[in-house]
Amino acid sequence: MIRPTPIVWAAGALIASTLVSQAANFEQVQDILETRCVECHQTGKTKGNLLMETREGFLKGGDSGAAIQPGDVSKSELLKRIHLPKDDEDAMPPAKSGPPLTEEEQKLIGQWVTDGAPWPDGLTLASRSKNALPRWDAPADPQLAFIEAYPKSVSLETAADFHRVIVIARFKDSATHDITRQSKLTLGDPSLATLTGTTLLPKKDGTTTLKIEYRGLSTEVAVAVKDATKPRPVSFQLDVMPVLTAAGCNTGSCHGSARGQDGFHLSLYGFDPKGDFYRLTTEMAGRRVNLAVPEESLMITKAIGAVPHTGGKLLAKDSASYNTLVEWIRNGAEYDADGIPQPTGITVEPSEMVLKGGDVRIPITVRATYSDGTDRDVSTLSGFSTSNDNSVTIDKHQGIAASKNRGEAFLLARFHTFNEGAQAIVVPADLPYTRPEVAENNYIDKLVHDKLDKLRIIPSGLCSDEEFIRRAFIDIIGELPSVPEREAFLASNDAKKREALVDQLLSRKEFTEMWVMKWAELLQIRTFQKGGSQVSYKAALGYYNWLRERIASNMPFNELVRQLLSAEGGTFTNPATNYYQLEEEPLKTSENVAQVFMGTRIQCAQCHNHPFDRWTMEDYYGFAAFFAQVKRKPAEDPRERIIFDGGGEVQHLVTKQNVPPKFLGGARPEIKNETRREEVAKWLTSTDNPWFARNVSNIVWSHFLGAGIVEPVDDVRVSNPPSNPALLDELTKHFVSYNYDFRKLVRDICTSRTYQLASATNETNVTDDRNFSHAAIRRVRAEVLLDCISQVTNTPNKFKGLPLGARAVQIADGNTTNYFLTTFGRASRATACSCEVKMEPNLSQALHLLNGDTTQQRVRNGKVVENYLKDKKSPSEVITNLYLSTLGRAPTDPELNNLLTATKEATKPEETREVLEDIFWALLNSKEFIFNH
């Protein structure tokens, strides 16, 4: 055995020391380049035609030649420019990008070039914010709570597979930072996979772990490799179509428009892959696809900008997307065989982030799952958008989010037919804030406070007892509290008197009437006649009473809806069947069911896959098929119709094939011994349904808080996410656990501290209108406002089919109305849209209250003031009682003194009465009366 001499040992140690020194040196240089240089010199933004993402880019250089000459500082253009005065136009980095490099940073780059510009194999630099956190070996930060990696586990299948890993730091104040480039990543078994930058590539089958370290914290990602040497052929549907979509070729502003672009048409977002394949390969044979010379195919040359293209340059030559298209053409440009695995969904991570300060950047990763159980990293094949680019921008191709101004944004990722997203919050970096210690009455308050804490918002204080009793009466039963009811409540010393009041109001019949009215609007209970289709007044009244009986008996709401959707028989004998008289077209019926009971609008998917939601044309026509067999025939009474199930199918608009029934976002059921409607009703109202209970919970919340957690309440879609997902999830969970008893859900809401907040704001929540940090000031809805006016003026109403003195909320027929109700936005019930109820104040309403007969005549006809004076009440007592009955509070001393001054000017009893009636009229016209607050 030959032993190494001391000289050999010394040489080896010297080489090892040099390599370690160079590696450490390059990590420091990498930090400088990624935070100060790469942003202006990266793919898609090559200032001076210089790319600084790879060593090859530095050596190739740009307009001024090579950026570096390894081993020779004097011939390296980069070194010359970083030493120029900061006001020199050729200085790097330019003055507008911040201060020049420090002397230490300049020395580091010089030493790196002198050492030969060493560069780790396969590394690609990526731009990082100047606010990026320090490297992994920096001292521990006590404010750093934990780190997490995405995806949580990696599965690499076939030689073409890869997964990018991103690492996120979470701080104790909920702040989020990307630390992917600053972390230390180590593969447990490097023989199984290659780690190129932060991307894992397969080498050999097996399992291992990826250890991630950062400032004393660590986490691990499980890595499994399968079929590492097996090639994966390029698929038209799974590879080519996603490239076209990611490049924007099939958007509505390009070839995906109804008429296409420049003579070439693609289906919108690729909803018709067979049609797109035909148009690419056959419509202009030999031009768009050139099998002989794939690189000269028109779809290639236009995409890389080699020939004129209206859409400009979309792909870089030799990029992954370019290579995918060329390889597909080179392999014969074939369509896929039947049975290929199809995408089943996508996951977007991280799903939520809090960004402190400007220019904090977070990369987003998108993983698609397939029907054969495999998955892929499709981040580079996804399109990205933001709902609020004033707060958070996002690179539409790379998926890197960057903070700007304070606010919230929803970041949407689209791949194939799937849309998912992440919620981002931006708060100022230097905002002085400490989470306040605020009492929590129940689970609602905790979840609201958690969200407000992320936004650095302090909730308002509690409303007064005077405000609470008026608010609760109007919201829960649609009436004002009487003066004795108010006095009894204020006089009570019970610490739980607000809970007791809510329980008392929930037990009153007026609560039932309020919610019968709410659901009568959504179920469109009204009379109409349209050709042979009609709902007579008798049928509408029966339908209304059917609904009222079930809500009054507290039937579980899912059972009520199940009975409704599966109803059959005569529209008189089984009034629920009137629901199928509203629309006889299966497509429209299915749209209404989805909108009312699931809160989602699927209409867009009738002609193409929904561009901003999960619904495809298969979903749309599959759901409509459940209602295709609803049939109608005349009964003995010409006003009645019989609803039953017969034959019938729905055809797909594109394929012209019959589409079997399919649950929205779910499977195709095997229907045995049940009608299709019974099957869909059972599915919709089951405890496993992800839409129904969530939708009802949101509708109930919206009624009491003035806005839904999803708003509008019937526009639930991926691109219109809930403002507080955790809150909506928990409300839904409780509603289901209550066996769909929404009285219990109402109790949870009305006894929460959140519902009882004051409408007065503080400096942190003055602009908040989505996170329930203060009570919303809401105009009282039309029916309730008319009932309140009738109540305080003692003037009964008369409506068709109802006795004198009935409330407007009791009107059964949507077509029964009057000028007041119409002017103040009562729903006509002609559509299923929640927007039919108009809550916005307008000029017509103000003019009607000022000059119409609703207030003036009622003040005189009700004789309220006259009766007070007959009872020998003084003007002061009359004014106080008017305030108490209308506004729920006594007048302030200045208000009372000013008004008494006016009454003293009257010289006759009749004049005194007129002054007091004018005061009554003024109170009815006041914002304080018309609004709930």
Image (cartoon, rainbow, N blue to C red):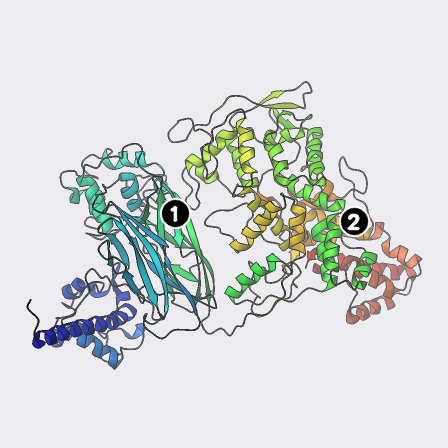
Residue located farthest toward the front when viewing the structure as drawn: 1
The 10 Å Cα crowd at callout 2, few under 14, some 14 to 19, many 20 or more, is: many
Residue ID for mark 1: 346
Residue ID for mark 2: 790
The 10 Å Cα crowd at callout 1, few under 14, some 14 to 19, many 20 or more, is: many
In the rendered structure, the answer to whether residue 206 lies left or right of residue 904 reads left
Judging depth in this view, the residue of 738 and 694 nearest the camera is 738
Which mark's residue is nearer the viewer, 2 or 1? 1
- Location of residue 886 (image quadrant): bottom right
In the rendered structure, the answer to whether residue 708 lies left or right of residue 364 reads right
Where is residue 806 shown, x and y percent of the image? 78, 42
Where is residue 401 shown, x and y percent of the image? 38, 60
Where is residue 93 shown, x and y percent of the image? 26, 73
Kind of residue sitting beneath label 2: Ser
- Which residue corresponds to the image point at 79% horizontal and 52% vertical from the top-left? 856
Judging depth in this view, the residue of 201 and 863 nearest the camera is 201
Q: Could you tell me which secondary element the residue under label 2 belongs to?
A: helix
Q: Could you tell me which secondary element the residue under label 1 belongs to?
A: strand
Judging depth in this view, the residue of 643 and 27 nearest the camera is 27
In the rendered image, the quadrant that contains the C terminus is: bottom right
Residue located farthest toward the left when viewing the structure as drawn: 2
Kind of residue sitting beneath label 1: Ile
659 w.r.t. 524: above or below: above
Residue 926 seen in this snapshot: no
In the rendered structure, the answer to whether residue 880 lies left or right of residue 275 reads right
- Which residue corresponds to the image point at 73% horizontal and 43% vertical from the top-left? 808
